[in-house]
Amino acid sequence: MPNLARRITDTSPKSYGMVAKAAGMDHTNRDIIHLELGKPHHTTPQHIVEATVSALRNGEVHYSDLPGLPEFRAAISNKLTSYNGIDAGADEVIVTNGLTQASFAAFMALIDHGDEVILLEPYYPQHFGKIEMAGGRPVMVALDPNKDYAIESAAIEKAITPRTKAIVLVNPCNPTGRVYSREELAGLAELAQRHDLFVIADEVYDQIVFDGAMHVSIASLPGMKDRTVSMYAFTKSFAMDGWRLGYVTAGPDLLAAIGKVVATEVTHVNTFIQYGGIAALNGPGEILSDMVIDDQKKRDLVVARLNQMPGVTCALPKGTIYAFPDISGTGLKSQDAADRLLKEADVVVESGAFYGPAGESHLRVCFGSESFERLELAMNRMQAFFNSL
Ligand SMILES: Cc1ncc(COP(=O)(O)O)c(C=O)c1O
């Protein structure tokens, strides 16, 4: 065994949950329906593809500015101001390889050995490993399923110690589908200010909200801009998961530190890919809203069907592409249910426990990754499985 770096040996092995368990199944003769991975079913809109191909044809194949193309950062600045209510200029933005790189750079820039970072549970597992790799210690605060996984600052405050450096917020929330209210966020913001903490805000689903729900960016609240790292991506809203394109804004010193990590790691994001991002932001807004309307219809179908299954109840998610049904009435543990659904019903969903103990007795069902027909088939299979228990 080579003498590996502590940042590797001290990082928990990454679990890929049901994604790993279902890998390779598609090469068997079974017809597996994948509702485990948040991979958009839509394809990237054509005008984005065309702009990228044109950029390549026009010779945009060389290095760009390290933080990203000025024209792209100007378009991002417009979006942050108009949609997120964050008054960030083009020079306050860094383009990244998806949200994944933005959050990695944020943790590397902020977290020292022994620093504690609060994760609200159910949490997004990727953040856990990144905190560890940066030398930090993830500290879990369980949100209460009986209170619709609401953010309660009193519970969070109990977990704060002199070593606490930051709180991670995923809003809208993967896996619960919660879109946090202004009041919940104001409570969190007050806590961050009183204890002098940073908020690392993963807002990858900011534009996937339903029923007219309003997404509120915590950085837009008074006094929060400089103590928040706000991270976004084209991944989900523009169906650009394979493109690896995202961006981050933060207070000046922190953003400079994040820029140092990104530039050290990759220099910058692929130049021609950034032209696709410009086309996405400057293109017709209906394309984006049509995709959200489609996701909302799929949500309605899946949630209605889940609520007809014995022992299953499902709240209506106000954002993201996930339903998070409570299966406690079936008597099954969430991992057993997920394993059996794969084995007996050829449907892959993620277990709630994958997102920490507060997710137990739930499943995460992605409704954004398949067609209506396939979703109906998956729901028929799940219904038959739960009927048979
Ligand atoms: C909460 C959350 N953050 C980050 C990501 C990863 O985003 P990206 O593909 O842009 O790196 C995902 C993808 O599922 C996610 O759900």
Image (cartoon, rainbow, N blue to C red):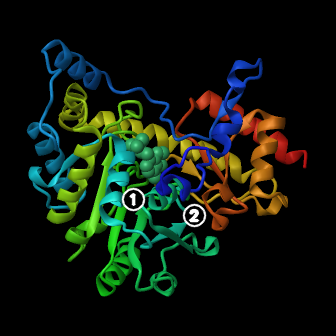
Q: Is residue 318 visible?
A: no
Q: CA distance from mark 2 to mark 1?
A: 21 Å
Circle nearer the N terminus (2, 1): 2
Give left or right: position of 209 versus 368.
left
- Whether 308 is drawn above or below 189: the answer is above
- Is the CB of the residue bearing disc 1 within 8 angstroms of ligand 1? no
Q: Residue at x 75, y 19 (%)?
A: 28
Q: Tell whether 10 sits left or right of 383.
A: left
Tell which of 298 and 86 is nearer to you. Answer: 86
Query: Is 306 located above or below residue 71 in the figure?
Result: below
Is 358 left or right of 91, judged from the image as shown? right
User: Residue tagged by mark 2?
Assistant: 122
Tag 1, which secondary structure?
A: loop
Check disc 1 and report the residue beneath it: 213
Dot 2: few (<14), some (14–19), or many (≥20) neighbours within 10 Å?
Answer: many
Residue 79: % across, % down: 19, 49
Residue 334 visible in this rendered orientation of the protein = yes
Q: Are marks 2 and 1 in contact (CB under 8 Å)?
A: no
Q: Residues within 10 Å of mark 1 (few under 14, many from 20)?
A: few
Name the image quarter holding residue 153: bottom left
Q: Where does the image place residue 291, in percent across and percent down from the top left?
A: 40, 36
Q: Is residue 188 above or below residue 270?
A: below
Q: Quadrant of residue 240?
A: top left
Q: Amino acid at mark 1?
A: Ala
Q: What quarter of the picture does the N terminus occupy?
A: top right
> Which mark's residue is nearer the viewer, 2 or 1?
2
Three-letter residue code for mark 2:
Pro
The picture places residue 283, in percent across and down from the top left corner, at: 21, 32
Above or below, comparing residue 194 to residue 219 in the picture? below
Q: Is residue 351 left or right of residue 168?
A: right
**Residue 385 circle label:** none
Q: Residue at x 51, y 59 (%)?
A: 128
